[in-house]
Amino acid sequence: MKNSISIILLLICGFLPLLAEKNGKWKLPDKELKSLSRAMDDASKYSALNEKKLDSLKKRLHMPGIPEESRINVMIKLSKLYRQNMADSSLRYSSLALKESSTSGSHRERYLAGLALSDALAASGFFSQAIDYYDSLANIRSDKECRIEFFKVGRRLYSNISSYVDDDSPMAAYYQQRYVECDDSLINLLPVSDLFRKFIIGERMVASGKFLAARGVLEDLLSQLDKSDNIYGMTAFQLAKVYKSDGDQTAYASYLAEAAESDIICNAREGFALPALAAWLYEQGDFATAFRYINFALEDAYKGNARVRMVSMARWMPAIDEAYRRQISASRNEWFIIAALASILLFALAATSFFLFRQIRKARASREALAATSRMKDSYIGNFIGLCSTYSEKYYSLVKLVDRKISSGQASELLKAVKSGKIGEEENEEFYKEIDSVVLTLYPDFVEKINELLQPSERVRIQGGLLTPELRIYAFVRLGVAESTRIAKILNYSVNTVYAYRNRMRNRAIDREHFEENVLKIGSSDN
């Protein structure tokens, strides 16, 4: 039993570490992942802050007496704010802005409204219409600020199309080239100190494989930004690519987490950092977290109707979902094994407890039996010493009597007393009383137990606390003196008398053949 429990414990101790072993090859960026999880939990708070800004603009839009020009600018601002988190609303307000600017707006307002509509169409996935509107504005003369906005819209448009196509086809290369041309124009138009210009330069370095230079530019830029700035997430995403190229997967995941957190804080539902992080976690074997992230990103994209992001994530979703389901199934199997081992251990412990309780009970019974035996030995010794003392007194009394009778010339009277048997008879009576007292002290139920062995009509009754000769003989049998000759000498009976008494008792017994064996069991633990 003890060896079985040891084997079970060794099996469980050896099995649990296997269950806890991680599948991933790289250390997870715990700090950044925890920060991202907090941002995901607070996503509704950031959405509420964005809604507050939108509500403020909507109130301005419906203010009485607001100039038409201001109304158009407010609609364009609403379209821009909605573009990164609610594409349908962005499309609605850009359409309203273009409609109103076509009848009462200035050339500049019509131009910016058209750009806003092209931007909203691209965010909604309507690329053909977005390109048509965008290209229709290409040759229209405008100021520098409008041209900067033109190329920003163009880079987002061709970035979305490139993400959607994402292959080696000629059309993908064409859209990528258009994207690069927009960046070239922005680099020329934006001031050298402009943060977005620095980002474009850093992004271009990453695209051309100049990772060491890109790292310096991007890390410097990131230090100047706050996570609430949309450029922060874009910069962190590019830094993640840099570290991935260096083989530092942990740093790659770390910057993806920071980019995803910035996207959530900015309420930008068009970012790709969170899906990319989910894909990485999937590769590391952390299916539960990967599933949570991809599910959050998909729900976020669905809320904002960001079709491009949903299509991009669709390629990962089945694999991550299937892997997560497999992990759940595997976890169930593992827990079943643990439960089975625990049940076996519990059964072994229960069996051991039962075994121990039995042993304890037996040990307690043995201690009680030993204590009873000890008491019985003490009683034997006490009674033996008492008998010896009594006979010692009787002996010295007899010696004194003999000495006195002889000294006084009464030898004939002494001889007469001895022949009459009076002296021996008195001593025998005293001896019998002592024997009876010892037997009834050691076995208080001796007479009752003897009677249980006899037929009901043959049962014995005693008077005055003295045993009958038959009971006295069987008392010696119980004490281990089985030979009739020894019993006869001790009790001063003839051997024939002892035989006769023994046969008479056997004949009165219920089980004649085993009567004396049963007498030996009186007072034992088995009886």
Image (cartoon, rainbow, N blue to C red):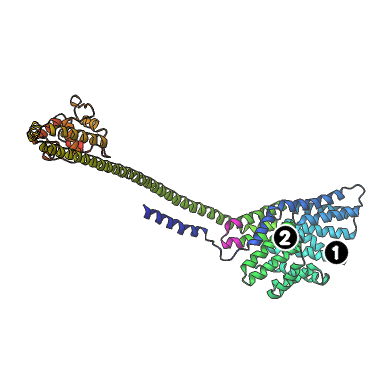
Tell me how many marks there are: 2
Query: Is label 1 in contact with label 2 (beta carbons under 8 Å)?
Result: no
- Percent coordinates x, y for residue 224 in the rendering: 77, 67
319 vs 504, left or right, is right
Q: Which segment did they paint magenta? A: 280-290
Q: Which mark is residue 207?
A: none
Instruction: Name the image quarter holding residue 230.
Output: bottom right
Residue 401 visible to an observer of this rendering: yes
Q: Which mark is residue 262?
A: 2
How far separated are the C-alphas under marks 1 and 2? 27 Å
**Closest to the observer: 171 or 517?**
517
Position of residue 287 relative to residue 387, above or below, is below
Category of crowding for the residue at label 2, using alpha-carbon neighbours closer than 10 angstroms: few (below 14), some (14–19), many (at least 20): many
- Residue at the location (83% across, 58% down)? 114
Q: Position of residue 89 (x, y in %)?
A: 77, 51
Q: Quadrant of the C terminus?
A: top left
Query: If you read the primary sequence from the N terminus, does the residue marked by circle 1 or circle 2 appear first?
Result: 1
Callout 1 amino acid: Cys
419 left or right of 92 in image: left
Residue highlighted by disc 1? 146
